[in-house]
Amino acid sequence: MFAIPILARATAFGLAIVGLAALRAQFDALTGVALAVDRIWAMVGYFTILTNAALVVHLLAITKGWQISARRAGALMVAIGTVGILYHALLANQFPTEGLGWWADLGLHTVMPAGFALWWLVFAPKAVRWTDVPYWLIWLALYTGYALVRGSLTGFWPYSFLNVDSLGWAHVARNIGALVVAVLLLSLTVAALARIIHSAKPGWSNSVRP
Protein backbone atom coordinates (compact mmCIF):
# COMPACT_ATOMS: atom_id res chain seq x y z
CA MET A 1 0.00 0.00 0.00
CA PHE A 2 1.39 3.38 -0.98
CA ALA A 3 1.33 6.56 1.10
CA ILE A 4 0.04 9.83 -0.31
CA PRO A 5 2.96 12.31 -0.50
CA ILE A 6 2.71 15.15 2.00
CA LEU A 7 3.05 17.71 -0.80
CA ALA A 8 0.07 16.15 -2.59
CA ARG A 9 -2.01 16.45 0.57
CA ALA A 10 -0.89 20.01 1.23
CA THR A 11 -1.65 21.20 -2.28
CA ALA A 12 -4.98 19.37 -2.24
CA PHE A 13 -5.86 21.25 0.94
CA GLY A 14 -4.89 24.58 -0.59
CA LEU A 15 -6.99 23.88 -3.67
CA ALA A 16 -9.93 22.83 -1.48
CA ILE A 17 -9.73 26.16 0.36
CA VAL A 18 -9.83 28.02 -2.97
CA GLY A 19 -12.88 25.98 -3.98
CA LEU A 20 -14.66 26.65 -0.70
CA ALA A 21 -13.91 30.37 -0.97
CA ALA A 22 -15.23 30.48 -4.54
CA LEU A 23 -18.41 28.62 -3.57
CA ARG A 24 -18.96 31.01 -0.66
CA ALA A 25 -18.34 33.99 -2.93
CA GLN A 26 -20.95 32.66 -5.35
CA PHE A 27 -23.40 32.24 -2.47
CA ASP A 28 -22.81 35.80 -1.27
CA ALA A 29 -23.05 37.16 -4.82
CA LEU A 30 -26.69 36.04 -5.10
CA THR A 31 -27.92 39.23 -3.50
CA GLY A 32 -31.28 39.02 -5.24
CA VAL A 33 -32.19 35.88 -3.30
CA ALA A 34 -32.93 36.61 0.35
CA LEU A 35 -33.23 33.19 1.98
CA ALA A 36 -30.13 31.04 2.35
CA VAL A 37 -32.02 27.89 1.42
CA ASP A 38 -33.22 29.54 -1.80
CA ARG A 39 -29.67 30.58 -2.67
CA ILE A 40 -28.45 27.04 -2.17
CA TRP A 41 -31.33 25.64 -4.22
CA ALA A 42 -30.49 28.06 -7.05
CA MET A 43 -26.78 27.19 -6.90
CA VAL A 44 -27.21 23.42 -7.02
CA GLY A 45 -28.95 23.72 -10.36
CA TYR A 46 -25.58 24.30 -12.02
CA PHE A 47 -23.09 21.69 -13.17
CA THR A 48 -20.31 24.07 -12.19
CA ILE A 49 -21.41 24.28 -8.56
CA LEU A 50 -22.08 20.58 -8.12
CA THR A 51 -18.79 19.61 -9.76
CA ASN A 52 -16.73 22.06 -7.73
CA ALA A 53 -18.47 20.95 -4.53
CA ALA A 54 -17.75 17.30 -5.32
CA LEU A 55 -14.14 18.16 -6.10
CA VAL A 56 -13.73 20.01 -2.80
CA VAL A 57 -15.07 16.99 -0.90
CA HIS A 58 -12.58 14.71 -2.64
CA LEU A 59 -9.70 17.12 -2.07
CA LEU A 60 -10.48 17.33 1.64
CA ALA A 61 -10.61 13.54 1.81
CA ILE A 62 -7.19 13.38 0.13
CA THR A 63 -5.92 15.90 2.68
CA LYS A 64 -7.01 13.50 5.43
CA GLY A 65 -5.07 10.67 3.79
CA TRP A 66 -7.69 9.04 1.57
CA GLN A 67 -6.02 7.19 -1.29
CA ILE A 68 -7.84 8.20 -4.45
CA SER A 69 -7.94 5.68 -7.28
CA ALA A 70 -6.73 6.39 -10.79
CA ARG A 71 -10.25 5.94 -12.14
CA ARG A 72 -11.78 8.36 -9.63
CA ALA A 73 -9.04 10.93 -10.19
CA GLY A 74 -9.65 10.68 -13.93
CA ALA A 75 -13.37 11.17 -13.43
CA LEU A 76 -12.73 14.34 -11.44
CA MET A 77 -10.30 15.59 -14.08
CA VAL A 78 -12.87 15.10 -16.84
CA ALA A 79 -15.66 16.71 -14.81
CA ILE A 80 -13.78 19.83 -13.75
CA GLY A 81 -12.15 20.02 -17.18
CA THR A 82 -15.62 20.09 -18.70
CA VAL A 83 -16.51 22.98 -16.39
CA GLY A 84 -13.55 25.07 -17.49
CA ILE A 85 -13.64 24.28 -21.19
CA LEU A 86 -17.40 24.63 -21.60
CA TYR A 87 -17.49 27.92 -19.73
CA HIS A 88 -14.66 29.59 -21.60
CA ALA A 89 -15.71 28.19 -24.99
CA LEU A 90 -19.45 28.83 -24.84
CA LEU A 91 -20.81 30.40 -21.68
CA ALA A 92 -18.54 33.21 -20.50
CA ASN A 93 -20.33 35.88 -22.52
CA GLN A 94 -23.74 34.65 -21.35
CA PHE A 95 -22.91 35.21 -17.69
CA PRO A 96 -21.20 38.61 -17.39
CA THR A 97 -20.19 39.24 -13.79
CA GLU A 98 -18.61 41.94 -11.68
CA GLY A 99 -17.53 42.39 -8.11
CA LEU A 100 -17.89 39.32 -5.92
CA GLY A 101 -19.50 37.36 -8.75
CA TRP A 102 -16.43 37.93 -10.90
CA TRP A 103 -14.19 36.45 -8.22
CA ALA A 104 -16.52 33.49 -7.83
CA ASP A 105 -16.46 32.86 -11.58
CA LEU A 106 -12.68 33.13 -11.65
CA GLY A 107 -12.35 30.57 -8.88
CA LEU A 108 -14.97 28.10 -10.09
CA HIS A 109 -14.35 28.24 -13.84
CA THR A 110 -10.63 28.97 -14.11
CA VAL A 111 -8.58 28.49 -10.94
CA MET A 112 -10.17 25.20 -9.86
CA PRO A 113 -10.04 23.53 -13.31
CA ALA A 114 -6.47 24.70 -13.93
CA GLY A 115 -5.37 23.97 -10.37
CA PHE A 116 -6.76 20.45 -10.32
CA ALA A 117 -5.37 19.74 -13.79
CA LEU A 118 -1.92 20.58 -12.44
CA TRP A 119 -2.51 18.51 -9.29
CA TRP A 120 -3.70 15.58 -11.40
CA LEU A 121 -0.68 15.79 -13.68
CA VAL A 122 1.80 15.84 -10.79
CA PHE A 123 0.22 13.73 -8.06
CA ALA A 124 -2.78 11.66 -9.16
CA PRO A 125 -2.45 7.91 -9.74
CA LYS A 126 -2.67 7.24 -13.46
CA ALA A 127 -3.02 3.48 -13.85
CA VAL A 128 -6.23 3.91 -15.84
CA ARG A 129 -7.78 1.54 -18.33
CA TRP A 130 -9.68 2.39 -21.49
CA THR A 131 -12.71 0.77 -19.86
CA ASP A 132 -12.66 3.58 -17.29
CA VAL A 133 -13.80 6.08 -19.92
CA PRO A 134 -17.53 5.16 -19.83
CA TYR A 135 -17.41 5.51 -16.04
CA TRP A 136 -16.21 9.08 -16.47
CA LEU A 137 -19.37 9.98 -18.42
CA ILE A 138 -21.73 8.98 -15.59
CA TRP A 139 -21.51 12.32 -13.76
CA LEU A 140 -22.51 14.25 -16.88
CA ALA A 141 -25.36 11.82 -17.57
CA LEU A 142 -26.69 12.14 -14.01
CA TYR A 143 -26.52 15.92 -14.11
CA THR A 144 -28.20 16.14 -17.51
CA GLY A 145 -31.09 13.98 -16.34
CA TYR A 146 -31.41 16.02 -13.15
CA ALA A 147 -31.32 19.35 -15.02
CA LEU A 148 -33.98 18.22 -17.51
CA VAL A 149 -36.31 16.93 -14.80
CA ARG A 150 -35.83 20.02 -12.65
CA GLY A 151 -36.31 22.33 -15.61
CA SER A 152 -39.48 20.54 -16.70
CA LEU A 153 -40.93 20.80 -13.20
CA THR A 154 -39.83 24.33 -12.27
CA GLY A 155 -39.11 26.14 -15.54
CA PHE A 156 -35.56 26.85 -14.37
CA TRP A 157 -32.99 26.03 -17.04
CA PRO A 158 -29.44 26.67 -15.83
CA TYR A 159 -27.93 26.58 -19.31
CA SER A 160 -29.48 27.92 -22.50
CA PHE A 161 -28.54 24.82 -24.53
CA LEU A 162 -30.71 22.71 -22.20
CA ASN A 163 -33.74 25.02 -22.32
CA VAL A 164 -36.47 22.74 -23.64
CA ASP A 165 -39.09 25.48 -23.30
CA SER A 166 -37.36 27.73 -25.84
CA LEU A 167 -35.50 25.20 -28.01
CA GLY A 168 -37.71 22.12 -27.99
CA TRP A 169 -36.74 18.55 -27.18
CA ALA A 170 -35.24 17.78 -30.59
CA HIS A 171 -32.83 20.72 -30.47
CA VAL A 172 -31.87 20.01 -26.87
CA ALA A 173 -31.28 16.35 -27.74
CA ARG A 174 -28.84 17.43 -30.47
CA ASN A 175 -27.09 19.75 -28.03
CA ILE A 176 -26.75 16.94 -25.51
CA GLY A 177 -25.40 14.64 -28.20
CA ALA A 178 -22.75 17.20 -29.15
CA LEU A 179 -21.85 17.67 -25.49
CA VAL A 180 -21.48 13.93 -24.96
CA VAL A 181 -19.17 13.68 -27.96
CA ALA A 182 -17.05 16.57 -26.65
CA VAL A 183 -16.78 15.08 -23.16
CA LEU A 184 -16.01 11.67 -24.62
CA LEU A 185 -13.13 13.20 -26.59
CA LEU A 186 -11.90 14.90 -23.42
CA SER A 187 -12.15 11.60 -21.56
CA LEU A 188 -10.16 9.77 -24.21
CA THR A 189 -7.53 12.51 -24.10
CA VAL A 190 -7.26 12.27 -20.31
CA ALA A 191 -7.04 8.47 -20.49
CA ALA A 192 -4.36 8.58 -23.18
CA LEU A 193 -2.32 11.15 -21.26
CA ALA A 194 -2.61 9.16 -18.04
CA ARG A 195 -1.47 5.99 -19.73
CA ILE A 196 1.51 7.74 -21.33
CA ILE A 197 2.60 9.24 -18.00
CA HIS A 198 1.98 5.96 -16.20
CA SER A 199 4.20 4.11 -18.65
CA ALA A 200 6.95 6.72 -18.48
CA LYS A 201 6.94 7.41 -14.73
CA PRO A 202 5.73 4.49 -12.60
CA GLY A 203 5.64 4.98 -8.85
CA TRP A 204 3.05 7.22 -7.26
CA SER A 205 1.14 7.10 -10.55
CA ASN A 206 1.54 3.32 -10.57
CA SER A 207 -0.75 2.71 -7.61
CA VAL A 208 -3.37 0.00 -7.53
CA ARG A 209 -6.86 1.42 -7.34
CA PRO A 210 -8.70 0.56 -4.13
Image: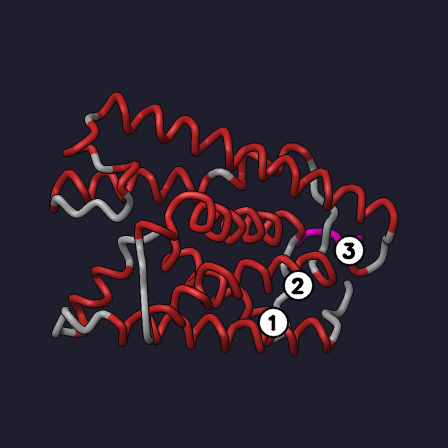
x and y, in percent, of residue 38 in the image: 16, 66
**Left or right: 27 in relation to 23:** left
Residue at mark 2 = 119
**What is the spatial separation of the Cα atoms under label 1 and label 3, in whole angstroms?**
16 Å
x and y, in percent, of residue 32 in the image: 14, 69
Specify how the rendered protein is coloured.
secondary structure
Q: Which mark is residue 12?
A: 1
Displayed quadrant of residue 48? bottom left
Q: Which region of the structure is painted magenta?
A: 206-210
Dot 1 or dot 3: first in sequence order is 1
What residue sits 74% from the left and 52% below the top?
208
Say few, some or many: other residues with alpha carbon within 10 Å of mark 2 (under 14 / 14 to 19 / 20 or more): some
Do the numbered discs 2 and 1 sit on residues whose CB atoms are within 8 Å?
A: yes
Dividing the image into 4 quarters, which one contains the C terminus?
bottom right
What residue sits 80% from the left and 48% below the top?
197
Badge nearest the viewer, 2 or 3: 2
Do the numbered discs 2 and 3 sit on residues whose CB atoms are within 8 Å?
A: no
Element marked by disc 3: helix
What residue sits 28% from the left and 29% below the top?
172
Element marked by disc 1: helix
**Left or right: 49 in relation to 84:** left
Displayed quadrant of residue 27? bottom left
x and y, in percent, of residue 51 in the image: 43, 56
Residue at mark 3 = 205
**Left or right: 133 in relation to 88:** right
Dot 2 or dot 3: first in sequence order is 2
Residue nearest the observer in this picture, 90 or 152? 90
Badge nearest the viewer, 1 or 3: 1
Dot 2 or dot 1: first in sequence order is 1
